[in-house]
Amino acid sequence: MALVFGGPENKFTSPDEAKVVVLPVPYGKTVSYRKGTENGPAAILEASDNLELFDEELNKEIHLIGINTAPLLKVSNLKSEAMITAVEKSVADILRLDKMPVVLGGEHAVTIGAVRAAKEKFNDLSILYFDAHSDLRDSYDGNKYSHACVARRLLEIAPVVASGIRSLSREEHEFALNNKGVKIIKMHDMIKNHDWQNTVKDSLSKNIYISIDLDVFDPSIMPSVGTPEPGGMHWHGFLEAIRNIISGKNVVGFDVVELCPIKDMVAPDFMAAKLIYKILGYIFP
């Protein structure tokens, strides 16, 4: 039986009527620490079976917007570039139908394909990027499409505003300082200055694509990631930030990536599912 975001209680899944299409991309070939991100999309979908579809904060049933779930994209045996091309085509197909794509990773490289497709439709596009790592290496382990190079590749498509950063090499630090296309808000600056949310919002264009690497969260609440990093964001602070930042913006799509499920630990999987559901509630008031 095919996995459906929201589980059997979500009755509003018709492809014709849905405003959102969830695209699961089970890919994990370039992961450099904990393996298993290819299992992330299915874990999110399985956890979503247990969501209460009424949201107590927004006082509404978010699923009524219509959330369709596409089959798992068959990319597990592809090289990075071919996987990215497959994601680009699938996301372009979703956008062509005037639906919003929600991409489930899999490793962060899936974002490159999604953003390529979004840029084809929305010329004035910028990328809201949440991550513990800057991902600005030009190449990693000989691969320009590694999960460690995602923001660098995205800069070739559209400007990037990255928040939650707390791990980067000296080379990445210097690259960011000398490249006007990328703006990095480091985690220690976010802690000192609550106005960082307005700085991010003001740096974005009207049309935005959101990419969320789950390692932006502190490992105390999100241990199930490939490259955990201490000192991250927490649930309520993140929700407040993203709700404020996207207010007045046109969100054209988003992804949640890098879930690396841990056996018999379902809380992070459920957190990822609920995060997606909450964001949809903020986008579609």
Image (cartoon, rainbow, N blue to C red):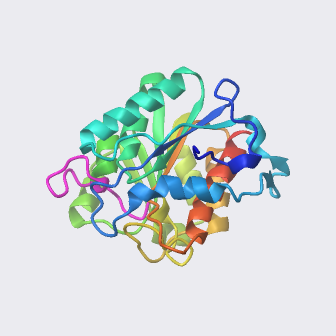
Q: Residue furthest left?
A: 142
* Residue stretch rendered in magenta on the structure: 131-148
Residue 9, image x and y in percent? 76, 48
Query: In front here: 251 or 224?
Result: 224
Residue placed furthest toward the front: 1
How many marks are shown on the rendered structure? Answer: 0
Residue nearest the viewer, comparing 231 with 49? 49
For the residue pair 29 and 7, the one nearer the viewer reads as: 7
Instruction: Give the residue displayed 32% in from the left and 56% down from the top.
Output: 135
Query: Residue 160, how many percent across, how many down?
Result: 41, 45
Name above or below for residue 210 compared with residue 43. above
As for residue 137 lying within the magenta part, the answer is: yes
Left or right: 165, with 277 as reference point: left
Can residue 241 be seen here? The reply is no
Give the residue at the far top of this rendering. 96
Compared to residue 274, the image places residue 1 above or below, namely above
Relative to 208, residue 36 above or below: below
Quarter of the figure with residue 283: top right
In the picture, the quarter occupied by the N terminus is: top right
| 206 lies left or right of 7 | left
Q: Main secondary structure of the magenta part?
A: loop
* Picture residue at 61% right of the left edge, 64% below the top: 271
Q: Residue furthest right?
A: 59
The part of the image, by quadrant, that contains residue 70 is: top right
Residue at 26%, 52% (x, y): give it.
146
Q: Is residue 179 above or below residue 275?
A: above
**Image quadrant in which the C terminus is located:** top right
Which x, y percent locates residue 6? 68, 49
